[in-house]
């Protein structure tokens, strides 16, 4: 047992007790001395996950794996070191709200390659790490995210040496997830040259033509005259995806800015991406990390062919707003990749359906279709998961859209009908949008 566990509680507590006062606090009651939490770990769900990881990993396992601890007996955790090494992810021109958001979420959101591309409805990566720890997922095991979006589950798993599979029916999400995953292992050597040929690199992507082959595109190789740059882009799929994501980010960013074109913004965005990747590369070397392989598949989870009992965990967050057309939001990027938004919409859970004469009836129709779809997702999750292992679903309910129906209750019922029994339920309060979405539920199921 670690020396930390054998040590008695603080002398401050002893002093208080001697005088008849209770001086201990929640943190002191939960954890032995010698463990310090990260400064921004303050919500109850975070303490819940911190406690779960402490119980599951033991003190010895916290330094390389923990998501919520700062130090263990004075030694900084890998999470703390990776986050503090991450460069500023926000451009000078960004709004003050966006700057504040990143500053106050240093340990939860923007580290490693997670901060690249502002994807809507993304997981808090720190929470995913906490969840992996709470369900005892080990190095070399495999996690599936059947609705992987921007790839948070995959990136987080890879950093911890856990293998991963991500599925998403949005080809742009799949593209983004594979680019972020690739960024974890890229060699930074070609970066300065890429930045010195910005215009040509921009043209390489801007003049690309969809052809549905790898990534769906044929790139304009002739636009790049510098041989080393052209070769790096042509031969390194991961690098090409990362730079391509920066190009698509610049396209989206320009649409939100007045008097700026994607070309104007490409240099700033690419510079930020490459710096994030370079810094993570330094953390990787310093901490001896060996990111595990991840696989991203563009597919519809309802019909995807999955091998029975082939993964050690399933972790995901389904869409849960019925007012937003997520797929429409990504139209320029989806069309760039050569896909049709209207066809994809038919497979997008939460967006599909919606027949009706007014907005309220359309939303009701979507909600009903949603429950049918989510039942299939839970069946697929139960099928692919090994017995005794966990499926974790993060979901919220906008009850004004669903007329009081709570999505998590229906998901829990579906899960139970396929042998996934709920054994833990953490509620995460949502700040900022409490009038529409009060909380998010982290549902832990075990396969019987
Ligand atoms: C809330 S987002 C997930 C975000 C993700 N956890 C992240 O961190 O980026 C839900 C995802 O479900 C995907 N989705 C919707 N219908 C799907 C389907 N039929 N098959 C697979 N993925 C689907 C959407 O494209 C979207 O990316």
Image: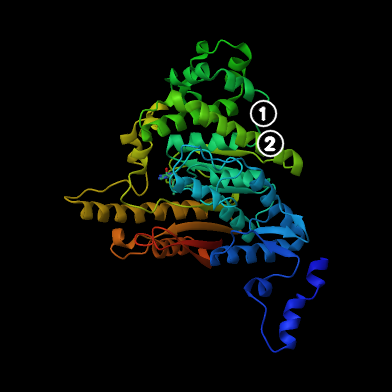
- What residue lies at 59% left-to-right and 61% top-to-bottom? 41
Q: Quadrant of residue 256?
A: top left
- In the picture as drawn, the residue positioned furthest to the left comes out as 357
- Dot 2, how many residues are within 10 Å of its Cα: few (below 14), some (14-19), or many (20+)? many
- What residue lies at 50% left-to-right and 12% top-to-bottom? 223
Residue 223 is marked as none
Marks 1/2: CA distance? 8 Å
Please state if 192 lies on the left or on the right of 433 as rendered: right
- Disc count in the image? 2
Pinpoint residue 225: horizontal percent, then vertical percent: 56, 10
> Is 77 placed above or below 196 here?
below
Q: Are marks 1 and 2 in contact (CB under 8 Å)?
A: yes
Quarter of the figure that contains the C terminus: bottom right
- What residue lies at 71% left-to-right and 83% top-to-bottom? 16
- In the picture as drawn, the residue positioned furthest to the bottom comes out as 20
- What residue lies at 52% left-to-right and 30% top-to-bottom? 268
Residue 281 is marked as 2
> Is 400 placed above or below 94 here?
below
Please state if 191 lies on the left or on the right of 397 as rendered: right
Q: Is residue 298 visible?
A: no
Looking at the rendering, the quadrant in which ligand 1 lies is top left
- Dot 1, how many residues are within 10 Å of its Cα: few (below 14), some (14-19), or many (20+)? some
Q: Earlier in the sequence, mark 1 or mark 2?
A: 1
Quarter of the figure that contains the N terminus: bottom right
Please state if 168 lies on the left or on the right of 356 as rendered: right
Residue pointed to by mark 1 = 188
Q: Quadrant of residue 402?
A: bottom left
């Amino acid at each position: 047992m670690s020396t930390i566990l054998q040590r008695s509680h603080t002398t401050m507590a002893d002093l208080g007790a001697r005088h008849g006062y209770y001086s201990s606090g929640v943190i002191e009651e939960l954890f032995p001395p010698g463990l310090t939490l990260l400064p921004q770990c303050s919500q109850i769900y975070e303490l819940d996950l911190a406690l779960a990881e402490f119980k599951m990993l033991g003190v010895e396992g916290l330094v390389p794996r923990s998501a919520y601890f700062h130090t263990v007996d004075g030694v900084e955790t890998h999470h703390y070191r990776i986050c503090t090494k991450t460069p500023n992810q926000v451009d000078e021109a960004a709004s003050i709200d966006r700057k504040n958001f990143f500053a106050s979420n240093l340990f939860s959101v923007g580290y490693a390659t997670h901060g690249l591309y502002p994807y809507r409805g993304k997981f808090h990566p720190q929470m995913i790490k906490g969840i992996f720890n709470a369900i005892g997922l080990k190095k070399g095991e495999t996690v599936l995210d059947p609705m992987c979006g921007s790839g948070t589950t995959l990136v987080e798993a890879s950093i911890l040496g856990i293998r991963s599979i991500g599925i998403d029916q949005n080809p742009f999400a799949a593209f983004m997830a594979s680019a972020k995953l690739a960024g974890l292992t890229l060699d930074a050597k070609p970066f300065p040259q890429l930045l010195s040929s910005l215009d040509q690199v921009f043209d390489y992507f801007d003049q690309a033509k969809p052809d549905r082959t790898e990534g769906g595109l044929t790139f304009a190789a002739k636009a790049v005259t510098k041989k080393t740059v052209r070769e790096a882009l042509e031969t390194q799929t991961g690098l090409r995806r990362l730079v391509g994501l920066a190009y698509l980010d610049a396209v989206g960013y320009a649409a939100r800015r007045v008097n700026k074109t994607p070309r104007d913004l490409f240099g700033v965005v690419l510079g930020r991406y490459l710096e994030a990747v370079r810094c993570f590369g330094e953390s990787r070397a310093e901490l001896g990390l060996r990111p595990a392989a991840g696989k991203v598949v563009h597919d519809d989870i309802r019909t995807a062919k999955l091998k029975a009992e082939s993964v050690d965990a399933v972790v995901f967050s389904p869409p849960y707003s019925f007012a937003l057309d997520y797929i429409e939001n990504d139209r320029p990027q989806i069309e760039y990749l050569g896909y049709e938004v209207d066809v994809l919409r038919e497979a997008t859970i939460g967006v599909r359906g919606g027949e009706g004469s007014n907005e309220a009836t359309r939303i009701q129709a979507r909600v009903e279709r949603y429950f049918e779809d989510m039942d299939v997702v839970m069946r697929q999750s139960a099928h692919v998961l090994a017995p005794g292992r966990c499926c974790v679903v993060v979901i919220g309910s906008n009850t004004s859209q669903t007329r009081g129906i709570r999505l998590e209750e229906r998901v829990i019922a579906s899960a139970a009908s396929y042998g996934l029994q709920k054994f833990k339920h953490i509620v995460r309060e949502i700040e900022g949008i409490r009038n529409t979405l009060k909380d998010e539920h982290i549902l832990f199921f075990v396969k019987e």
